[in-house]
Amino acid sequence: MKTLRVPEATVTRMSIYSRFLERLDRNGMTTISSNEIADGVGVSPAQVRKDLAYFGEFGTRGVGYNVQTLLKYTLKILGLNQAWPLAIVGSGNLGQALSTSRGFNARGFRVACVFDYDAKRVGKRIGQLLVQPIAQFPELTRKENIRIGVIAVRNSLAQEVANIMVQSGVQSILNFAPITLRVPADMEIRNVDLSITLELLTFNVGLKAAQSL
Amino acid sequence: MKTLRVPEATVTRMSIYSRFLERLDRNGMTTISSNEIADGVGVSPAQVRKDLAYFGEFGTRGVGYNVQTLLKYTLKILGLNQAWPLAIVGSGNLGQALSTSRGFNARGFRVACVFDYDAKRVGKRIGQLLVQPIAQFPELTRKENIRIGVIAVRNSLAQEVANIMVQSGVQSILNFAPITLRVPADMEIRNVDLSITLELLTFNVGLKAAQSL
């Protein structure tokens, strides 16, 4: 099969289009043009058409897109035509914030278990879930068919948690610890470094200041 | 002045190079080649050279880069040659996680105040800080010269918080509420949607599954 090379920015925009289409669908809208999608999410119409073209031909010239059909395609493209139970390791402030986050409990995602190393935290309730001991990770994640693990522990534990995830058959990791983890090449891993987002802000503020000189 | 058009991915990589250089500098390394930078952060040497070229000529052919000089340039480019005190509004799990995050308290960033609407939370201690009432936002942020505001409240309060930030002279906003905020065009705003990162993961896992058919 031909390997698709889809830019990450396109995938991110597909998420945004998909959420927008979800809203339209809820509001009973049935067709939409690329110009209206562009307007609704704040990118150019050419960009919308270019992004969608990576994945095939969806619209009808002069008629636009069927909202439900395009929504279904975007969900399929994003791998969201199936359920994605998640396991979070770490039940501190970040783990708790993620466990109860709407984004983490929507669009096919569902926080199915939360684990901790700290015996004092095990057994505590977070929303509907009880914090489980890390030793239970392999058994519980297999039982729940979990393929995404979220690392929300302190740096010194992060590599050990990654190893446990690899050994337990988790396929992908979302890592919030600001360190580089060693995982097998076939493991899908994504690091979330919140301070890099801050630096994007200061870059732009600094740039504007420089340009107003 | 000519407007620079630097891709966001380049700015993100500048953050990554800059952290890597910081580590080298701490370890006493004085010069480095673009190949070594590429190796250290996991991108191609051509990408490193292309990224740095947006900002000028830094290296000497055959010698490479002086670590301290290049580090200083990257910090300046990222706007980090100055202090950036932050104000966080919202002292729930997310606000607390951010307040004590190493990323939020490094490289020129420092969480200077945390505010909340909830009288029951005001006065509580988070690390070195006491949670302040939201009514104090204009006065305290002016006193602390805060130019970055972080929104970590529930959706229904997020627009009101953004308005308060605009009125108080904050220049940029990092918004964790998964809604679109209306702010003046000259306000630098960046939305952090953690679930979009999840969809990047599922897109790639789905793609791999499709390609192995």
Image: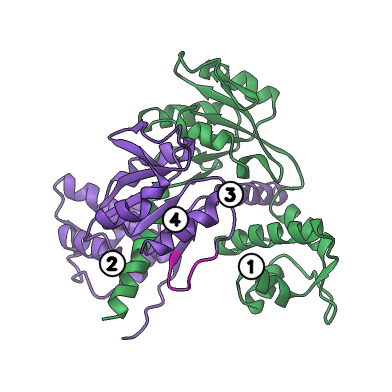
Chain colours: A green, B purple
Question: Principal SS element in the magenta part?
Answer: loop
Q: Which one is in front in this view, the residue at disc 2 or the one at disc 4?
A: 4
Q: Amino acid at mark 2?
A: Ile
* Quadrant in the picture for residue A149: top right
Mark 2 to mark 4: distance in Å?
Answer: 19 Å
Tags 3 and 4 on a common chain:
yes
For residue B81, say whether it is visible: yes
Q: Which chain does the residue under circle 2 lie in? A: B
Q: Nearer the viewer, mark 3 or mark 4?
A: 3
Q: CA distance from mark 2 to mark 3?
A: 33 Å
Left or right for A54, reference A93: right
Q: Is residue A152 visible?
A: no
Mark linked to residue B197: none
How many badges with numbers are in the image? 4
Q: Position of residue B97 (x, y in %)?
A: 42, 37
Choose mark 1 or mark 3, whichever is in front. Answer: 3
**With respect to residue A63, does A174 lie above or below?**
above
CA separation in Å, label 3 and label 4: 14 Å
Please name the residue that numbered disc 3 is placed on: B155
Q: Which residue is mark 4?
A: B174
Q: Which residue is mark 2?
A: B77
Dot 2 and dot 4 within a common chain: yes
